[in-house]
Image (cartoon, grey):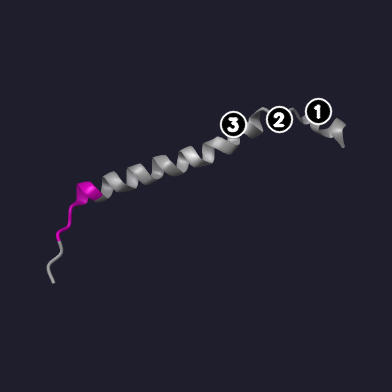
Amino acid sequence: VPVAFNPAGIVLLDVCAYAAIMIVLLIPCLFISKVDPAKTVKML
């Protein structure tokens, strides 16, 4: 069965997936960076 292979489409899909994953990983980092360690220890 012949399969159409488009390398540019695969690279574009990889780049889009990489960008989406990096954005999803960046969101929690933004919240964590606002936490002050001194205040966190005082609360305990």
Does residue 40 appear left or right of residue 1 in this picture?
right
Quadrant in the picture for residue 15:
top left
Residue at the spot x=63%, y=32% of the render?
31
Q: Which numbered circle lies on residue 16?
A: none
Q: Which numbered circle lies on residue 39?
A: 1
Q: 30 above or below 19?
A: above
Dot 2: within a 10 Å radius of its alpha carbon, few (fewer than 14), some, or many (20 or more) residues? few
Distance between the Cα atoms at labels 2 and 1?
A: 8 Å
Residue at the spot x=71%, y=30% of the render?
35
Does residue 24 appear left or right of residue 13 in this picture?
right
Q: Are marks 2 and 3 in contact (CB under 8 Å)?
A: no
Q: Which numbered circle lies on residue 30?
A: 3
* Residue 20 horizontal/vertical position (percent): 42, 42
In the image, what residue type sits under mark 2? Val
Q: Are marks 1 and 3 in contact (CB under 8 Å)?
A: no
Q: 25 above or below 3?
A: above
* Residue 41 horizontal/vertical position (percent): 84, 33
In the image, what residue type sits under mark 1? Lys
Which stretch is magenta? Answer: 4-9
Dot 3: within a 10 Å radius of its alpha carbon, few (fewer than 14), some, or many (20 or more) residues? few
Distance between the Cα atoms at labels 2 and 3?
A: 9 Å
The local secondary structure at tag 3 comes to helix
The local secondary structure at tag 1 comes to helix
Residue at the spot x=34%, y=42% of the render?
16
Check disc 2 and report the residue beneath it.
Answer: 35
Q: Are marks 2 and 1 in contact (CB under 8 Å)?
A: yes
In the image, what residue type sits under mark 3? Leu
Does residue 6 appear left or right of residue 13 in this picture?
left
Sequence-first disc among 1 and 3: 3
Distance between the Cα atoms at labels 1 and 3?
A: 17 Å
The local secondary structure at tag 2 comes to loop
* Residue 25 horizontal/vertical position (percent): 52, 41
